Image (tube, grey):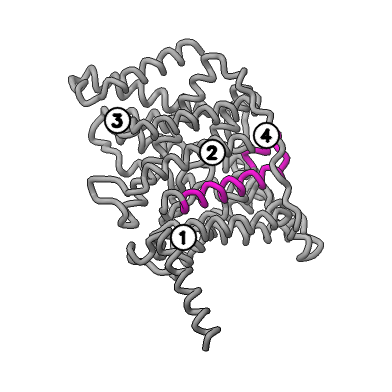
Amino acid sequence: MTDRASEQDSTIEKQTLLERIFQIKGRGSSLRQEFIGGLTTFATMGYVAIVLPTFYTHVGMPKDIAISSVIMVVFGGTLLMGLLANMPIALAPGLGLAAYFSYTVCDSMSVPSATAFAATVVAGFILFLIVLTDAWRKIVESMPLVLRLSITAGIGLFITFIGLKNGGVIVAHESTYVALGNMLHPRVLVTIGGVILGGILMARKIPGALFLTLLVMTVVCMFVGISRVPESLGACFSPVVKLPRFVVGKVDFQGLMNLDMFQVIFTITLIGFFDGVGVLLGLSRKANLAPPDGVAPGFRRAMLTSSLTTMGGACIGTSVPTVYIESAAGIASGGRTGLSSVVTALMFAVMLFFQPLIDLVPIEVGSVALILVGSMMLGELRNVNFDDITDSLPAFFTVLMMVLTFSIAEGIAFGFILYAFLKLFSGRGREVKPILYLVALVFILHLALR
């Protein structure tokens, strides 16, 4: 009897401790709901451990190190989000900014990765100061909704283009610039088949549809010879975690002293800020943590967590982390507190020991995720008022120029400039905040001095 009583007392103490930290009952949740919510979020965004490393290997990072870096940042950022902000939100490097980092900054602009990571650290510090000084409220008010929507949609089309290219669906052509690839090639069939399978699973609202699609298509790749087959089940597990040594101590701040890098820092800060704020506002309301006209109690701590993770992540080899919309799946499954995020973080920590398995996933399978996620991001355009030319034209050029110039920054520049000019010379200049005119001027100088 004494042992049973002591067990009950111990359970009560644990529950009291968890309740004190996470306010589970106070938010109308339970341990079971939080556990299921955390697992659901993990299942819906587990694909990031497969897809994101491909961006960093593109700039020369070894794949095993890239996998470690991504998983460690997701683990650390999501764990902090749960413990500090007490919100059922997961953090991971954003696909759009990862694409900008690899293909625009490092590839098109020929910026060394060490300098690009330094720019990310600076951007994270700026984000930290913005949130710390409460200036974020004024910045949010100055940014028109149409530009936020079109930037998200443009990034979606941008990563879709990358996915189609990496999957061999489209290829370079001397006369037409792009052309259709060999549709009978195994890698193209895998990419198209993966998109169809993913679309079907999503349409049927299968939990973890994207993650499940990537697993199935990886097995298919093993059968058709695109990916190697593991020698045994034990070969998929590694008790030794390869730590991210590639970037630590190699961040180059001296390379930031030029106009191009100032523009890079500005773009990273701009996208990272509005991406995080926009999704965080939406998810906190979905979880009933915020009033209709306000923000959740842990909102500021969540943004501070994001900025700190940005600085730390850049030092071990990742681009700017952002709040993942996939957290909505965990919230829909019952997650209401930071305990849900802790569960998600721990699941990613377990993935660290399955690096050999992740290493088997070919780039074609990662392309499937880019195409599917990109298509969902493009859906933001449905909220653009296409009856107002002063909104629709900037949105159109933001999306179009990101893809045609293969640069997220150039698309944003065209969007800001067109929006400011159209509003000003159509007699609606007062609809635009002064800071936006200043930003448009900066972008004009950037384009003129290229």
For the record, the magenta segment spans: 54-83
Question: Alpha-carbon distance for marks 1 and 2?
Answer: 34 Å
Q: Which residue type does callout 1 highlight?
A: Ser
Question: Alpha-carbon distance for marks 1 and 4?
Answer: 30 Å
Helix, strand or loop under label 1: helix
Residue 287 painted magenta: no
The residue where tag 1 is placed is 340
Residue 411, image quadrant: top left
- Packing grade of label 3 (10 A; few <14, some 14-19, many >=20) is few
Q: Which numbered circle lies on residue 157? A: none
Q: Is residue 45 visible?
A: yes
The residue where tag 3 is placed is 138
Image vertical order of residue 266 relative to residue 281, above or below: above
Q: Which residue type does callout 4 highlight?
A: Val
Q: Whole-percent x and y of residue 22?
A: 41, 59
Residue furthest toward the right? 231
Q: Is residue 113 left or right of residue 333?
A: right
Please state which of residues 433 and 408 is positioned toward the viewer in this rendering: 433
Question: Alpha-carbon distance for marks 4 and 3?
Answer: 35 Å
The residue where tag 4 is placed is 248
Residue plotted at (81% across, 62% down): 231
Question: Alpha-carbon distance for marks 3 and 1?
Answer: 31 Å
Q: Which numbered circle lies on residue 161? A: 2
Residue plotted at (73% across, 58% down): 222
